[in-house]
Image (spheres, coloured by chain):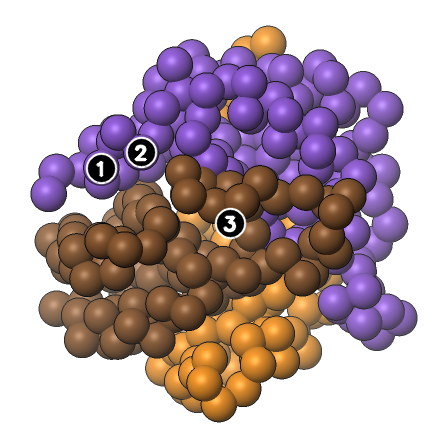
Chain colours: A purple, B brown, C orange
Amino acid sequence: MTYHKAKKVVIIAEKMLSDKICKIIDASGARGYTVVPAGGRGSHHKHYTSERASVVDDFSTVRIEVIVRDKSVAEKIGNEVVEECFKNYSGIVYLEEVEILRPAKFNGE
Amino acid sequence: MTYHKAKKVVIIAEKMLSDKICKIIDASGARGYTVVPAGGRGSHHKHYTSERASVVDDFSTVRIEVIVRDKSVAEKIGNEVVEECFKNYSGIVYLEEVEILRPAKFNGE
Amino acid sequence: MTYHKAKKVVIIAEKMLSDKICKIIDASGARGYTVVPAGGRGSHHKHYTSERASVVDDFSTVRIEVIVRDKSVAEKIGNEVVEECFKNYSGIVYLEEVEILRPAKFNGE
């Protein structure tokens, strides 16, 4: 099997923004995404403290990752998430290079 | 300390495939792997909806990552997971470049 | 919007080390970090088994990621975590290249 270059977009955001972010991803043509429970600290977040609260209770954030073949699609997802979701809420977006198998499973056009 | 180039394999799969995937990783010579609970949507997945189901209940997927020093070992893990696990189940595999400390902790030969 | 190169540090460690690791990150000047519950197997970890224990109960590890603009800051965080936390406990650190939006949100000087 052959590995193909692709772009991963990672979005870390408050859980309440998940639906809005997933709609942006769906509209981009991406075929899927992965959501992981997350906590942490950002510019506006409270500090994560394992002593004060159970770590499990503190996962009020999500880490969403999506892979698309086309860099411009990845950048568009990132731009839209920042513009539509992060004006009033904290969160970050970043891109990474990845290599994928079975590229037909990743659309993004 | 010096950072050394290595390859990370990320596998996103249904939780019921975890044991099979971990056996493939162990057989590759990799010294360890990390498993994170995940949800999301793929070609065959249901749509993730934070309104309809608790996010915690929806984590029926796992995100497994493993780092090996040798690119060919990484590719072999990816190929075997796709061939042995993803014929009948949805899932994805991708590779990334990473830089590691203490390379002796990562085998993969 | 423009994407800017940055470095991501990923630390996988026992949950009990979280506070110590987060203090190292805070002291580096980084503006935030993301924590995800994790399990798995390392050189000194027990084998992850979905048959013997609930996957949720097995997440006694954390996966912490932090993004900084400056490679030397990323390397310093990695070095300090290994030196101060991983003498007596297992864990790994790795770096990755990422591209970020709004670089002012990521300090790291």
Tell me how far mark 2 sits from mark 3, CA to CA: 29 Å
Quadrant occupied by the C terminus of chain C: top right
Image location (x, y in percent) of residue A19:
70, 33
Give the residue type at disc 3. Answer: Val
Quadrant occupied by the N terminus of chain C: top right
Residue C93 in sight here = no
C34, B64: nearer the viewer: B64
| Residue at point 22%, 37% (across, down) | A102
- How busy is the neighbourhood of tag 1: few (under 14 within 10 Å), some, or many (20 plus)? some
Helix, strand or loop at label 1? It is loop
- Quadrant of residue A79 within the rendered picture: top right
Q: Which residue is mark 2?
A: A105
Tell me how far mark 3 sits from mark 1, CA to CA: 29 Å
Specify the farthest residue to the top: C1
Helix, strand or loop at label 3? It is strand
* Foreground label between 2 and 3: 2
Give the residue type at disc 2. Answer: Lys
Q: Which residue is mark 1?
A: A102
Asked if disc 3 and disc 1 are in contact, CB closer than 8 Å, the reply is: no
Helix, strand or loop at label 2? It is helix
Residue A44 in sight here = yes
Tell me how far mark 1 sits from mark 2, CA to CA: 6 Å
Asked if disc 1 and disc 2 are in contact, CB closer than 8 Å, the reply is: yes
Q: How many marks?
A: 3
